[in-house]
Amino acid sequence: MKKILVLNHFPTVYPPRSGGTLRYYHIYNQLSAYYDITLLSQSLSHSGDMVQFSPTFREYRVQKDPLYKQISTRIQNREINYELSLIVNMKLSRRATIYKQYYDDLYEESDIIIHESPYLLRYDRYMGADHKPRIYNSHNHEYLLAEQIWKHETARIHLQAVYRREKKLVQEADLVFAISEMERNSFLSLYNPDPQKIKLAPNGVNPGEWYQRKPGSGTEIKALFIGANYPPNIETVRYIIDHLADQCPEIQFIIAGTCCKAFGISTKSNVQLLGKVRHEQKLELFAHVDIAINPVFVGAGVNIKTIEFLSAGIPLLSTPFGARGLNLVDSKHYFRAEKEDFADKLKLVCRDEQQLQKVAAQGQKYINDNYSWFESAKNLKKEIDQLKI
């Protein structure tokens, strides 16, 4: 069984909850039926551990390096939050860190090296100097994402470093996986790699995990948004609180996930900020809300929340940006709205229960027929098996 080593700047969570951890865990859990998989991740704390998911699937979560605080202190700015750890990790990858020691040890026994992002590329100093295949299994077009959401000038100084690392990965890796045709074209346009090596590995779902839906259990319409503590999600929550809640007082807005962290306690009677929820709570929420909303306006990649909402059979109202990369058809798979008319569209679609359920059923079938972690992993396996090892 070939051995694969995967480098990532964040750890898995089990059961996974947010978009990044959902892809990170499920893709490699599926692939571990065919390869021996080791995830080399960065712990979010000052202690590390090793988790054995199965005999052929494990994760080393490397503790924060003592140098982390030293470097982060130099660039710390109150307006830099999300970007800070990414910038620090790029700088740490040039140092003799604990993560580097783990990588050097695990590299020796690995047949294939996979990068989940460009941020830890410098650790892989043997890239181009050995005969082990390299793969970039992208979650997003990272440079374009950073260019959109890194707002502060202190962070934006480092954008060119992201660009250079991602360009090197896309151009020099033996295989590159993009999560949509849109992202594939973006890589081709910006980095001009060999198009034959850019393949698709979409985000997915496990269609069988959802509870049976029981909407309409109260007098108010319940609209759900869920997301991690991530700048585009925070912007969405602010839009819901400041605009949608006032324009749609008859609708109860339920917001779940760590995206609530920036907002404290809601002062509006029709907004519930649940914060971080367990997996079972998430399944219950999906079963009982009347509609899901995804009014996102920036970002990259494909929203896993959009895939999950539809897979669970929830009617969805989304901006085109929230539905990007999935080839969804308005009023067939979901309902489309722009920022300016989102409230009006929300009130309109909620008046027609029959249409809501018809579109939800069609969206559910489309997603469950075309997007699953099993199929994505099968696509990866087919391409990996063609590499010369």
Image (cartoon, helix red, strand yellow):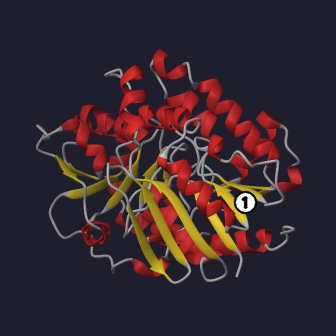
Residue in the image at 68% along x and 36% along y: 165
Residues 171 and 73: in front is: 73
Query: To which quarter of the image does residue 379 belong?
Result: bottom right
Estimate how packed mark 1 is, as few (under 14), some (14 to 19) or many (20 or more) residues with alpha carbons within 10 Å. Answer: many
Q: Pinpoint residue 61: horizontal percent, then vertical percent.
A: 43, 59
| 281 vs 162: above or below | below
Query: Is the residue 225 above or below the residue 333 in the image?
Result: above
Q: Please state which of residues 169 and 191 is positioned toward the viewer in this rendering.
A: 169
Which residue is labeled 1 in the image?
A: 200
Q: Residue drawn at (53%, 59%), measured in percent from left and top?
A: 40
Q: Can residue 165 be seen in this view?
A: yes
Whole-percent x, y for residue 101 in the image: 54, 52
What amino acid is at disc 1? Leu
Quadrant of the image containing the N terminus: bottom right
> Regarding mark 1 in the picture, which secondary structure is present there?
strand
On the rendered structure, is 73 left or right of 149?
Answer: left
Residue 304 or residue 11, whichever sits in front:
11
Image point (63%, 28%), residue name = 161
Task: In the rendered view, tell whether residue 264 sits above or below residue 213.
Answer: above
Q: Where is residue 361 in the image (x, y as percent from the top left)?
A: 48, 72
How many numbered marks, from 0 up? 1
Name which quarter of the figure residue 2 lies in. Answer: bottom right
Would residue 216 appear left or right of 27 to someone viewing this image? left
Q: Is residue 2 left or right of residue 367?
A: right
Q: In terms of image quadrants, where is residue 82?
A: top left
Tell me, yes or no, if residue 305 can be seen here: no
For this rendering, which residue is in front, 144 or 347?
Answer: 144
Residue at 30% over, 69% down: 279
Left or right of 249: which side holds 20? Answer: right
Image position, residue 139 (x, y; %): 59, 51
Quarter holding the C terminus is bottom right
293 is higher (above) or lower (below) than 238? below
